[in-house]
Amino acid sequence: MIGNQATLSDAVAYVQLGVDVALYGRPGSGRTTLLRAIADKLRANGFQTRLVAGTAGLQAIPLAGLADRFPEPTNASRVLNLASATQRMVDEGTAGKYVVLVDDAELLDDTSWGVIRAAQYRVGFPIVTGHLRTRELFQGAKNRHLARAYQLEVQSLRLAEMEALLEKRIGGRIESVTLSRIFGKSGGLPGLACGMVDIGVQEGRLAENGDEWVARQELWSPALARLVERHIAPLHREDREALETISLVGPQSLDALVELIGADSVERLEERSLLTYESTGGQTRPGVMPPLITEYYRHLMLPGRAARLSKRKSDLVGRMFDAPVDVATLSAAQPDAMFVRAVQDQVRARVDDARAEWRRAPALESAVTYLSALGDAGGDESAIDAVLRTVDTDDVSEAGIRLTVWRASWLASRGDLAGAKDLLRRAEARAVVYKSLAQAARVRLCLVYDGYTGDVRADVVEPVGMDPATQATVYGVRAAALLVQGRVAAAEEELASVDPASAGSDWVEYELLRGLIRLAKGEHSEATILGYRALERARANLSGSAIRAAAYFASLCQLLHGNYREVTTLVETAVAVGAPNANAPASLLGVLCMGSIVAGRRGNTGLAEVRLRQAEQLPIADGSLPGMTTSWPRSQLRMVEGQMAMARQELREGADRLWSRGARWNAALEHLIELELWPEPKRLEELAPRLDQVEGELVAALRAYVEGLVFSDPTRLEESAPRLVRTGRPGFAITAYERARAHFENAADTESARRVQRASERLVAQLEPGSFDALRFRSADILLTPREIQLARLAASGRSNQQIASELVLSVRTVESHIHRIMKKVSANNRRDLARFLADANVPEPE
């Protein structure tokens, strides 16, 4: 069974203790599969299990739920005798360990419930029930079993779990964008997702393209209606209409929703868990759960009703998305299915609005807006061609040049980089006022695709006579080119020419350049804050391209720090939000490469290979900024395989490619990784001229540490440690102290060795456990001792502290102390988090 392993362990543990369990899950959540998995696991532990299921339409028939479980042996047609059924269950319950499992418990007839409860009263066996998820507050009054049952919720699958399930179902890999669409539409419910895949294959909507399955067209099918009806069938007409209204109106604030459909309808939909809430930018926004219900209504809606609801939508404009951005935390929210769906809905809404404006006023300005929206949605080539055939593509006004810039980016993303550059050169020759905008666009294409080694201040003239937003775009490209080449001070000068308020739609590029410059200067904390602020703003705007760009930068900050769990969340966020902007592959490349690196270091080689494969399928293999290179994760995988010579070759060749394309900052960092792993004086001497050309304390501090390794110099190592801490690399600093201590001890300098050891201990005491890595290129087992791994596995399996103490012959207080320390080390809040950590990190069994 994929997903809900912690829930499975919890349920089994409670049953073994004689406690009743109630499982709640929506239709399609995998509740029945989980119930059967619980039964299988209990049978393996010596339990006799009795499976019962309620059935709609038979609730009024006494003992209907037990009739097929206890047929009368003398007369198959005879009505089951109440006393006989109770006695049989009592006999089964007294024969040994025994449990009754009831699926669709709310549909089981009252008489069957009476038999089960009467037998339980006499024998004392536990009961496990499965329920459609409704508000637990009312369940105890309907069924007294629930008043004493431990309640567990069947969790929606995470993206990685969904991927594993569907690839097993379909017998092959699923293309990442298609996977994201299925994940978002299904709300993470495995039953719905499997239904979408099965119907998609049958109807040809999903087809094999090489070695992966890809959606060829819209994933909605009328055949999916029967899956949706399971969720909405119990609703009264008023509530069905409320869902229909929400489906057309789309994302909005909770207050606006209450005004739209009424507070009573909102509460009733909440009770049936058909509404869920996504908190973005400090504002709570409701959404339909599962999102496939929205697809159902949108495809079945009558034109007249759609027009009327659209009018109500327009009346609400101005009340939505007006809350301030919340940047109080530096921990990214999990990319659950509802958030993914909200992003996809926003992309669709942008396309719809831009299309409507284009049709109303087919001018250059509306064409650029419409094409940008289509690009963010993955690119509808027929719609794009229709727009380009309509407008004047030789216009040299600002809108005309922006249209040319978009066309060039589109061509490059489709593999025609030469044609894209030629288009921009011709625009440069024609343009007067906006010449620098076309020049900047050509430099940007070089930075993304084949590199840039020129002098950007000569190749892109000063943006004189333009509006502030266009000037911001040009200065931003100039700053990016200089930063990529390691000219940090010059990049900062260019960015100082930009008024932040004028960045407009390019705001995320401006914010990330600010953050990258701070990172290069060694101001790691300030850079990280900027990254998370950008991420929160992108989430609040539900902008997929901005989310990917901000997640890339935040991931880079956290990767340097060694907070691999946070990097994993950020990578999942960037991957989950769906189709990347057709004109912006670089940030996704960086995210996937860092995702592969972190997965490898956490011991999950399979995921590391998947992320690397996804990166290699992009149109670029190397990017301009740190982390944007496939050679780094490839090298790490070679090390895992024990192929150290090949690992070193990957790093060398990768760094050389980066240097030749002008990505000197990125190349310098990869050169230093090589020197960290193979600290050879001759190699350092060869690379010194390159390292000298890259400015900034981020590189300088790491270089000082590497030089200490190369020359086995404990003083250099000790002095590099505080610099490494300031630049956001505490794991390196701890290693620097440890290496320095070892060298001092070998030289019989006991006093220096003790001084360094105290400094290392003070640093470790200041750090949050699990947020740094002092032993890189190893999996997450570095966090826990073998004894701690043993205790963690027992706790994650559902055993109580008392049970663990008995099994390991320890005191309960000792176990409690160990578990508390383990939880702190891996940043787990409860045993469910601990189980997820062990699974994600692939922590090995203790020897």
Image (cartoon, grey):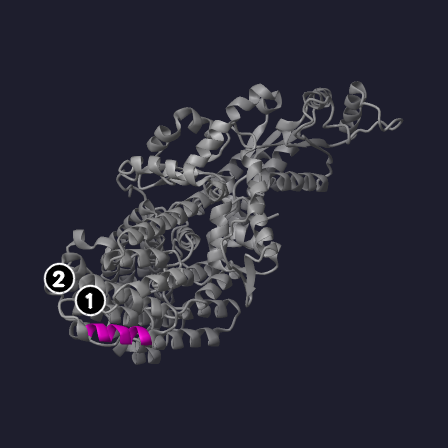
Quarter of image, res 126: top right
> What range is drawn magenta here?
419-428
Instruction: Please state which amino acid type lies under the numbered disc 2.
Output: Met
Helix, strand or loop for the magenta stretch, by majority: helix
- Rendered location of residue 16, percent (x, y): 65, 34
- Rendered location of residue 791, percent (x, y): 55, 44
Q: Quadrant of the C terminus?
A: bottom right
Specify whether residue 427 is painted magenta.
yes
Q: Residues within 10 Å of mark 1 (few under 14, many from 20)?
A: many
Residue that carries the numbered disc 1 in the rendered image:
437
Given contact means CB atoms under 8 Å apart, are the residues at marks 2 and 1 in contact? Answer: yes
At a point 32% along the width and 46% down the height, the residue shown is 330
Specify whether residue 668 is painted magenta.
no
Q: Marks 2 and 1, how far apart in space?
A: 10 Å
Instruction: Please state which amino acid type lies under the numbered disc 1.
Output: Leu
* Residue 738 visible within the image: no
Is 789 or 755 nearer to us in this picture? 789
Q: Number of labelled discs?
A: 2
- Rendered location of residue 539, percent (x, y): 34, 47
Q: Tag 2's secondary structure?
A: loop
Q: Is residue 841 left or right of residue 116?
A: left
Dot 2 or dot 1: first in sequence order is 1
Q: Is residue 669 left or right of residue 224?
A: left
Residue that carries the numbered disc 2 in the rendered image:
466
Quarter of image, res 6: top right
Q: Residues within 10 Å of mark 2 (few under 14, many from 20)?
A: some
- The disc label shown at residue 97, or none: none
- Rendered location of residue 310, percent (x, y): 36, 39
